[in-house]
Image (cartoon, helix red, strand yellow):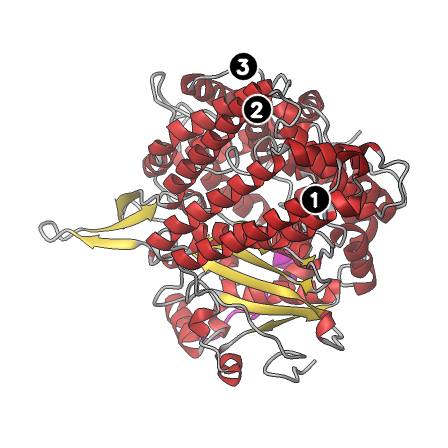
Amino acid sequence: MEPSFSGFPFPLDLPTFTDTAESLTQNLLEAESALKTAIETVLTCQPKDATFDSAILPMALAEGPLAICGGRAGLLEAASSDAQLRLEASKAHMRCRKIYESWFSRKDIFQRIQVVYSQLHSINLDAESKRLTEKWYHNFVGAGCELDMENSAKLTKIKEDIALRRADFNRVLIDNKDVIWLTRENLAGVTSSVLNSFQRNMDETSGVETFGVPLKHSTQRTVLAQVHDSCVRKAILQQYEHSVSAALDPFADVIRLRLQQARLLGSKSFATKTLERKMAGDPANIESFLTQLQDALMPLGREGLRNLEGIKRAESHDDGSDGFYVWDKDYYHEKHLERLYEVDNRQISEYFPVEPVLGGMLEIFEDVFAIKFYEVGKNVCQRLAVDPATLTWHKDVKMFTVWERDAKSQNDFIGYLYTDLFARQGKYSTCANFSIHPGFSGVNGERHQCATALLTNFPPPSSDRPSLLQHANVIQMFHELGHGMHDLLSRTRYAGLHGHRCPFDFVEMPSQMLENWCWTPSQLSSFTKHYSYISEEYAEIWKNEHNKAELPAEKLPLEVAEKLASTRFVDVLGTLRQIVLAKFDMLIHGESELSMADMKQWFHQKREEIGLIRASDTETFDYGHYFATTVHFIEGSACNYYSYLFSQVYSADIFHSAFKDNLRDSDVGKRYRRLILQPGGSRNPIDMLKDFLGREPKQDAFYHDIGIRS
């Protein structure tokens, strides 16, 4: 469809990012004032006379502006290139959390919510309003509203301390500047596109050039899969696992304080308290699921390890006495794919230049969900007399407006998508989706559409080629965009139930379901483009490097995509590693208070026992603290790491039941959108799954996918 107005189907007033410390503070004050007014309205009714409309609705409608402040501050804290603004955004983000905590700690409000909650089964109330009442009731209970005054004060102090230490932890990771300096010889095997993205330093005395490899998750994984020298791989991994050491104290403090919080609330552990409202129910169910999966995968994992050990022995011409270690795994996994499946990820990465891949992914979403993306480029800004520098928080960020495919009015506008793809100093260090603000209905019934952002840390383009992705990066980007689609395509009345504001062990399911498109040969090939076709300059560079007159195929050949797809469930060792991390999450949030030494010992013992690969070649080595280099155990994913595996049961069931033979069928996509994505957190996930599947969910497809036959 050709856009009819300035690049969009209909006129829009575009949001801007001209934030300052003052504007962040002012916006938050206004949102807090609106909430206070709503609370005053609620308190005019007596507890015994409380109804949803009098005791909950005013606050539910006032939450929207507060959610916008929190989401926007969280984004700027993670992605602004201005260090001072990041600090101010961090303060605003923390202040927003404190407002929520103070709100949900008020016993006078809770008295009224209790009355409405007790009547839910007998009053005439729509399903979304009932769901919000249930959620808020449990939020107030979790905030200590059933505690006496003394314990309430203790809980308030604990939560304040947790917020402070979480902020300290996040700042360490975001501001991490740790690099390891290596020579070109050390980095033999690393592709030029990756090598050229690193800082360089020339020693004037020796004339030796060194490269600064950032000790960030996505970068070190890429380099470990390519560096030929085992000693260099070992040095990179060990330095990475000893980086951000300043994060250890806040990490330990948060875990310790969470246990105190849970005990005050009458639970044995933080895990027990957290899981009460999730699909899994309690830690015992998670332990059973993980152990059952672990036992089933162990034979396949041992076979996979023997294959990798055999490749290392053959390549190094040794008898195996050198051993096989965690820093060898990614490198020899790539070798295994090349030998057994004829998959060369380095060559394949030439078909994954990041921006064409992004465009192809958006086309898939357009077809499946019957929507349309319009990029807000310079021409659009000129027609609207808007400074493009004000529309995003960094010059590399792209902005899209999202509409229904057959938009007939402004009512068919869906929201905004932002993509921030390249690594830079001071930016959040892993891939994630950030909900800038949810969609919701305002006090006067007006619709506020959502805005969502994809943040990745791929190497920026170099002088001789674009940013090229590994297939694993492609999956990662598609996964995070899946969270963005959940955000954009949800439509709820209340901000507190929008998008992925649903039980945490359901949050990953929609994204994992969409990953299947990255493993289906026809779909994978459809969004590839060999980088030599992007420009004449790139074409000449490729021809000169390969001494060829003809360019390769523009799209990834289907037979290559088929070979790549056949490797999907080969990395059983990777799944066992996920089980280790999920069990570690449950352990540190369990009933016992653990020291940092206890955490390290358990993690590295189970890393070898369950993960099967040795983590050290000496008996006295300090293993480091890999678990503190990621936000998973401190931020929203706490007590939720298991869900990456748990929700695959549901995602596999949905894909094989509905989409496998209907990959671009918008009728199926719209039904999925209506029954799974649109409700956000307004319905019980099991009910949504049963409605979509027409039956109870099953595990069969998941176990079949990972190679386990009953």
The part of the chain drawn in magenta is: 549-564
Res. 528 visible in picture: no
SS at badge 3: loop
Q: Earlier in the sequence, mark 3 or mark 2?
A: 2
Side of 465 relative to 54 (left or right):
left
Which residue reaches farthest left? 205
Q: Which one is in front in this view, the residue at disc 3 or the one at disc 1?
A: 1
Task: Answer with left or right where residue 18 lies relative to residue 554.
Answer: left
Query: Is 385 situated above or below 585?
Result: below
Q: Residue furthest top?
A: 592
* 405 relative to 526 in the view: left or right: right
Residue 592, numbered circle: 3
Is residue 382 shown in magenta?
no
Q: Amino acid at mark 1?
A: Val
SS type, badge 1: helix
- The spot of residue 71 in percent (x, y) is 54, 52
Label 1: which residue? 42
Q: Is residue 84 left or right of residue 55?
A: left
Dot 2 falls on a residue whose secondary structure is helix
| Residue shown at the point (60%, 39%) measured from the top left | 103
- The CA span between labels 1 and 2 is 22 Å
Q: Position of residue 665 (x, y in %)?
A: 80, 63
Compare residues 388 and 28 and report the one nearer the observer: 28
Q: Residues within 10 Å of mark 2 (few under 14, many from 20)?
A: some
Return the mark for residue 152: 2
Q: Are the residues at dot 3 and dot 1 in contact (C-beta closer than 8 Å)?
A: no
Q: CA distance from mark 3 to mark 2?
A: 23 Å
Q: Residues within 10 Å of mark 1 (few under 14, many from 20)?
A: many
Up-down relation of residue 594 to residue 207 (above or below): above
Nearer the observer, disc 3 or disc 2? Answer: 2
Rendering coords of residue 23 (x, y %) = 44, 59
